[in-house]
Image (spheres, rainbow, N blue to C red):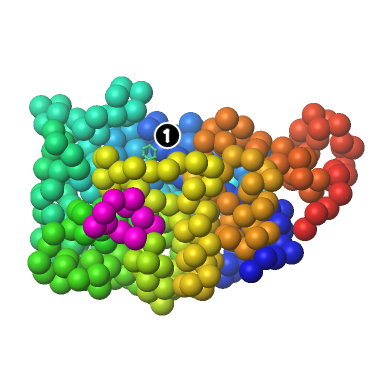
Amino acid sequence: MSSEAGLFSPLTLRGVTFRNRIGVSPMCQYSAVDGFVNDWHLVHLGARAAGGAGLVMMEATGVTPEGRITPGCTGIWSDAHAEPMKRITDFIQSQGAVAGIQIAHAGRKASCDVPWRGGAPLPPSDPAAWQTIAPSALAFQDGHPVPHAMTLEDIKRLQESFVLAARRAVKAGFRLIELHGAHGYLMHEFFSPLSNHRTDDYGGSRDNRFRFVLETARAVRGEIPADIVLAARLSCSDWTEGGVTIEDSTALAAALKDCGVDLIDCSSGGNVHDAKIPADPGYQVPFAAQIRREAEIPTAAVGMISEPQQADDIIRKGEADMALLARAFLRDPYWAVHAAQTLGAEADVPPQYLRGYHQSRTAAPAKKAG
Ligand code: 8OZ
């Protein structure tokens, strides 16, 4: 399923057109105070929008205070949290990029310290620590806190928190909302048999383990406008015997499509501390390709994508509809402009910076490669 479309061809999903297939993957900044965004987030996300990406996604943002990974993570559990995000989405969109947000609950992996202080679970004696929740009372690993197993009431309440978060995100100007169903956080904890030992309607069979994610996706889709893109990031494999397989995640992707999800962001791992993950360049791309082919839903590839030719090949071979980059964007906010130069495509350089690229002050550079 190869395609004429390359990394710099536009993509339209629902009512949203992305100027190219390059996305800034959600990246925790650990720089919020009480969940509130600030100038760091504006500058971090804004620079990457000015740097030519088609999609700029805000980091994993807690739908409840307890859903944050660390006390420095952003939150969207109140209208007051969403309000200052509008300045950020306005700026992103003024630069020609689409603003997206990943809404999340970290489940049993919440209540940790920020990575530059070690990233370990906060000890219960720390006043900043909180009680974690999860599908089952199973710690992530020995020595980590045991989460409280969610009651059916907890489940309903949390699904409502996702819906309210999505509504606030729309009001804040985001045009893509991604449900974080990966990396061992709460949604993934539900659909993985390694972290879900429930015996009620939310555990046991595959359909039951999928239920929390599917119900939440359906509820969110029902509450956001038809022209807002709904994405889901999945851990497509637990890389562990007895865990999630690509066959499971392909089935989950197909079911999410039926719930009105538009894009599957294909990641893996994170639910098991000692999984053997072959993290070579592009190692998760085959998941994006298989889900795109078999579940017939647009996909984003993510993970160890750093080179322009590598990203362009993924799109041209039809392995994914978008390439999301994380660490490459930490190193270079202008990765998209530099990739365009490497590939001979049209770069979207802010007019203020054109002289830095030896271009005329008015004209767009180079030749166009669709
Ligand atoms: C990097 C470090 C810590 C957390 C994820 C939110 O894995 C994260 C994360 C990424 O999705």
Please state if 227 lies on the left or on the right of 96 as rendered: left
Secondary structure of the residue carrying numbered label 1: loop
Estimate the x, y position of residue 83 in percent, counting from the top left. 42, 48
- At x 38%, y 43%, the residue is 277
The quadrant holding residue 122 is top left
Q: Residue at x 41, y 68 (%)?
A: 250
Residue at position x 35%, y 23% from top? Answer: 116
Q: Looking at the figure, which quarter contains the C terminus?
A: bottom right
- Left/right placement of residue 78 relative to residue 140 reads right
Magenta stretch: dominant secondary structure: loop
**Mark 1: few, some, or many residues within 10 Å (few <14, many ≥20)?**
some
The amino acid at mark 1 is Gln
Q: Position of residue 223 (x, y in %)?
A: 38, 70
Is 55 inside the magenta-drawn segment?
no
Residue 214 left/right relative to 344:
left
The magenta segment is: 236-245
Residue 91 in the image: x percent, y percent? 59, 44
State the residue position of label 1.
29
